[in-house]
Amino acid sequence: MGPALAAASVIAVVAGGNSAVVASPRGAGIERVSVSTGGGQADGDSAFQAISANGRFVAFDSFGSNLVPQDTNGALDVFVRDRRAGTTERVSVSGTGQQGGGDSYGPAISADGRYVAFGSFADLVPGDINGIPDIFVRDRLAGTTTQVSVSSSEVPADYESRFPAISADGRYITFSSSAGNLVRGDTNEAMDVFVRDRLAGTTTRVSVSSTGGQADGISDDAAISANGRFVTFATDAANLVRGDTNDNTDVLVRDRLAGTTTRVSVSSSGGQANAYNVDPVISADGRYIAFESYAANLAGGDTNDTPDIYVHDRWARSTTRVSVSSTGEQPDRFAGGASISANGRWVLFYSDASNLTPAGGDGLAGAFVRDRLAGTTTRVTPLNPGWESETESIYLAKISADGRSIVFTTAAANLVPDDTNDRYDVFARDIG
């Protein structure tokens, strides 16, 4: 089992997009978004985030109790920052606006920022008395909160659900769940990946083989295409595709319209990976899958003995390593945490490598963007951001669908003025 599954925690032609990712001086264009509407800094750590298609809205979870009025639950909550309006609202609330009595976390946000999906221990809807983490969706326009970790007959999941992802229009939510009552015939006693169609009111399991057979191992870490047709996920199962004999976590894609499941953590010749693969993300049309891999045989010249980021082109059936410098040099240290733009041109990842850009490195992790069309790699977070620890300084970074903005989390205190809270904060930066 790969570590991401064990923790509870896009070139033939790349279409569209003409903006360029450009390097900026230290701190340029960086704003802290884990703040109150009045700009006050959070009095608790903020971490996981998601960004809308144009970069305007950022959803994040935070222990901060001073980001909105009357936050008295002492719990982790989910917030949305409107970068244009300068406002912050809490979305992990009930349909009547009441705060929850448990932690809410791990948001995903629709393209226009209207819908936010998140996990929560809180009882945010009537009848939620199962006492386990569920998946909810907040409609920020209508002011409603609905539970989506339910069966097609609206029966709540009988075990943990987590890690939601959302389609561009907010209709489809994919999530992982260990529940055995969301679909008929779920007898594998393993975490599976499901899709909830909020319009049709149906829930289907997608971590199945092309013949519908259920997985013989854990499936997790799902992402969904813009229209909800394609879902990618990582799995320990060995029976979802033919020829899976590597005994490693693999990345698969389910085509919900065609009813097929294929493995994408393979080399361009179709060879299976010789180590585990995790944390996939998907382009808007489902063509490109980016993922983190510990394998050394997915592309030629992989001799760095450290995780890398790859992109598999499902149309061309090719796999390319993107965690490389502009000259093609492989990183001298790890690369992880892939995020991909809607058209698949730009892939963001974080790394503490010292050789990905001419400026070198500082021993701390920074965020990089690979332009797959131009063949360039640019560091998009500052060097030496001022965190005095020896662990990663930048992590959980993501890129907006249009490729023009990023969000990231760090404990660095010198990226914006008056950062004195000694906490992990969420930052945004426009890069193109």
Image (cartoon, rainbow, N blue to C red):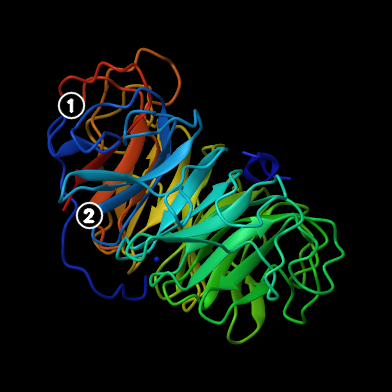
Percent x, y of residue 238? 79, 62
Residue located 21% across and 45% down the image: 87
Rendered position, 270 above or below 119: below
State the quadrant of the N terminus: top right
Rendered image: mark on residue 313: none
Camera-side residue of 260 and 82: 82
* Tag 1–tag 2 contact (CB < 8 Å): no
Percent x, y of residue 246? 76, 56
The answer to whether residue 220 is left or right of residue 316 is right
| Residues packed near mark 2 inside 10 Å, few (<14), some (14 to 19) or many (20 plus) | some
Camera-side residue of 239 and 153: 153
Percent x, y of residue 43? 35, 22
The local secondary structure at tag 1 comes to: loop
Camera-side residue of 143 and 260: 143
Rendered position, 420 above or below 279: above
The mark lying in front, picked from 1 and 2, is: 2
Residue placed under numbered mark 1 in the picture: 416
Amino acid type, mark 2: Arg
Quadrant position of residue 404: bottom left
Q: Tell me which label, 1 or 2, sits earlier in the chain.
A: 2
Residue located 56% across and 49% down the image: 119
Residue placed under numbered mark 2 in the picture: 56
How many angstroms separate mark 1 from mark 2 (CA)?
19 Å
